[in-house]
Image (cartoon, coloured by chain):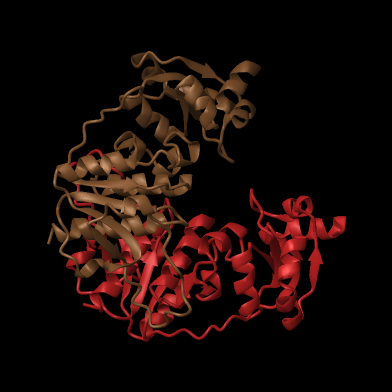
Chain colours: A brown, B red
Amino acid sequence: MISKSQIKHISSLKLLKFRKATGEFVVEGEKMVHELIMSNYKVNALYALPAWLEAHQELIRKNQLNAEKISPKELERISSFKTPNQVLATAQIPAGFDQEINFNDLILVLDDIRDPGNLGTIIRTTDWFGIRTIVCSQNTADLYNPKVLQSSMGSFMRVNVIYQDLKAFIQKARTEKVTVYGTFLNGMNIYDEKLTEKGLIIIGNESQGISPEIEKMIDKRVNIPSYSQNLTNQAESLNASVATAIICAEFRRSFNP
Amino acid sequence: MISKSQIKHISSLKLLKFRKATGEFVVEGEKMVHELIMSNYKVNALYALPAWLEAHQELIRKNQLNAEKISPKELERISSFKTPNQVLATAQIPAGFDQEINFNDLILVLDDIRDPGNLGTIIRTTDWFGIRTIVCSQNTADLYNPKVLQSSMGSFMRVNVIYQDLKAFIQKARTEKVTVYGTFLNGMNIYDEKLTEKGLIIIGNESQGISPEIEKMIDKRVNIPSYSQNLTNQAESLNASVATAIICAEFRRSFNP
């Protein structure tokens, strides 16, 4: 049984404004909540169906979790899912993430990726390819948006996602002598480029691409060739998370022949 | 001004059941509606804001379109979008698509892709790479689902998306001597394989992968390597539309050195 004010509080965390005000976010689903408990995140509370609580008594005791029993109807009210699944957790947004950036590896840079599903999918992809750092512009979708967490499939706990002023960040990166790659529809065929093992890969906004101010700072403009016979009548571009994935794959392939 | 029953009818087309019953579907947004009018699809009606109608009188007259003026409030009621955009069209689902399949090119085969966003993104990607045919299992998301159309970004008008019994289809393909590729987490590194120019690429369901019955019919099991140092703690898999894109890119790259 949870109170009306608890329901209101948890539901409010779907919105950035309330996540910022309270420093809390929500994680849902058995698998992801389990990973959350095992991670470095501080879990504030669990809200779970009786069956889940019954099955996880040991986990709750060991981790000294504050767990509340709720009904399926209550879970539905606080969930962002159409079909909520057993358990929901609230957790603390880390005040200061580890901001140490390793410039000796690839770093993904997102210049205003707005769609939460795209951001989550990109985080999942970078996790798969062992890219440990994503630097996001301040206008990129919020990491703790429920749709971002969901489509990241838990990868948000393993990838360092940092929000920074991109211009200042890229300037700093250039003093570390890393190559700055950017994706453009009129860039060079990425498969013809000799890619470097370390570097920044900049991905632009879904409809606007890379912003003019960032474009000026790019060393190599690359493009994914369509190999299509019929250039007048075909897709104009790739989805941003798809383009990111093809590029990450190609960077990794180049150094693992 | 549109009637209550029209609003009800158009809204009902968000659901597969009503699309099947009426043979109609909805396309939204200026760009996509324009492409629809220029395509082979039969447009039944347009519902547009006054400004759009004003600006497109010639288009409406030339194509003998049945266009109704509606208010922003009415558009909001019939739209699937959070922020509806100027114009919405209803169109006819083609009774029998061109079912002629060219086995001399790559064919993408979807074994129960359930997420509409994934299906739409996959259609957009195949369009980009000039893959003209997608064969879907009967349980794959419906092509005319608004989210599929939206994430395809209009590519659904250029790619032949066919729903068939996959087992029978693959059996037929094998008589045409095409190689059947399937993606598996324990498959061979795709970058080590000598890929063929034509063939079927089978993509499995988001959580279950390729079904056992289809798995038996696969010639080559392939996998996208993660190149990650830390295999015990990383993403377990890639998003289905991301994996599809990386594989399509690699097939095209192999034959365009």
Corner quadrant of residue A60? top left
Q: Position of residue B23 (x, y in %)?
A: 71, 71
In the displayed structure image, the side of residue A100 where residue A207 appears, left or right: right
The image quadrant where one finds the N terminus of chain B is bottom right
Camera-nearest residue between B169 and A16: A16
Please say if B25 is above or below A214: below
The image quadrant where one finds the C terminus of chain B is bottom left
In the displayed structure image, the side of residue A10 where residue B18 appears, left or right: right
Corner quadrant of residue A99? top left
Q: Is residue B20 visible?
A: no
Please say if A168 is above or below A236: above
Corner quadrant of residue B28? bottom right
Q: Residue at x 33, y 84 (%)?
A: B177
Q: Is residue A29 visible?
A: yes
Q: Position of residue A224 (x, y in %)?
A: 31, 67
Camera-nearest residue between A105 and A125: A105
Q: Position of residue A87 (x, y in %)?
A: 49, 28
Q: Residue at x 37, y 63 (%)?
A: B244
Camera-nearest residue between B185 and B229: B229
Count of numbered marks: 0
Q: Residue at x 39, y 60 (%)?
A: B210
Q: Position of residue A256 (x, y in %)?
A: 13, 57
Camera-nearest residue between B123 and A55: B123
